[in-house]
Image (spheres, rainbow, N blue to C red):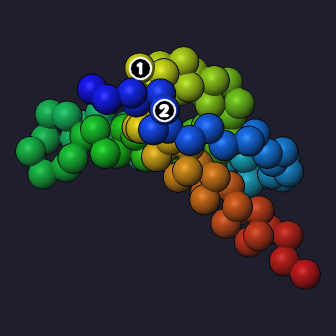
Amino acid sequence: MSGTSEEIVVTAKRRRLPLPFWLRVVVLLVGWIVLLVGVAGLALPILQGWFFIGLGAAILSVASEQAHRWMRQTLHRWPKVWCRIDRIRDKIHDKLHRMVHRE
């Protein structure tokens, strides 16, 4: 391993605008469904379980700061994986926010 802490660029924490309550409920439901598909994918050879578990956790972390903190604490050993999931989370949040707050 060559200095992984030097290779990882720490991005400034930006303030996220809150999503409406109804959208948070929908995002939580979708996140749990994707997460359960990922758990089923661990046993079924057709589905990629780890991919769906990561995607479901990223979706859940959009609606829940507690899920986001849990993911950050769990994935602190793998900073590259954490950065990728955090970018997915930011993209999902930005798209949802733009979809709801169109002018």
Q: Which residue is mark 2?
A: 6
* Residue at image location 68% in from the left, 55% down from the top: 93
* Residue at image location 70% in from the left, 61% down from the top: 94
Mark 2 neighbour density, 10 Å: few (under 14) some (14–19) many (20 or more): few
Mark 1 neighbour density, 10 Å: few (under 14) some (14–19) many (20 or more): few
Q: Position of residue 17 (x, y in %)?
A: 85, 51
Nearer the observer: mark 2 or 1; the answer is: 2
In this picture, residue 34 sits left or right of residue 13: left
Badge 2 or badge 1: first in the primary sequence? 2
Q: Position of residue 91 (x, y in %)?
A: 60, 59
Q: Position of residue 47 (x, y in %)?
A: 19, 49
Instruction: Kindly indicate the quadrant of the structure image that contains residue 4.
Output: top left
Three-letter amino acid code at disc 2?
Glu
* Residue at image location 54% in from the left, 18% down from the top: 73
Mark 1 lies on a secondary structure that is loop
> Quick check: 95 above or below 41?
below
Q: Nearer the viewer, residue 65 or 6?
A: 6
Three-letter amino acid code at disc 1?
Arg
In this picture, residue 47 sits left or right of residue 22: left
Q: Nearer the viewer, residue 25 or 79?
A: 79
Quarter of the image where the C terminus is located: bottom right
Residue furthest to the bottom in view is 103
> Quick check: 89 above or below 102?
above
Instruction: Kindly indicate the quadrant of the structure image that contains residue 77.
Output: top left
Quarter of the image where the N terminus is located: top left
Q: Position of residue 31 (x, y in %)?
A: 52, 44
In this picture, residue 86 sits left or right of residue 44: right
> Quick check: 14 above or below 71?
below
Q: Which residue is mark 1?
A: 77
The answer to whether any part of residue 29 appears in the image is no
The answer to whether any part of residue 36 appears in the image is yes
* Residue at image location 84% in from the left, 45% down from the top: 15
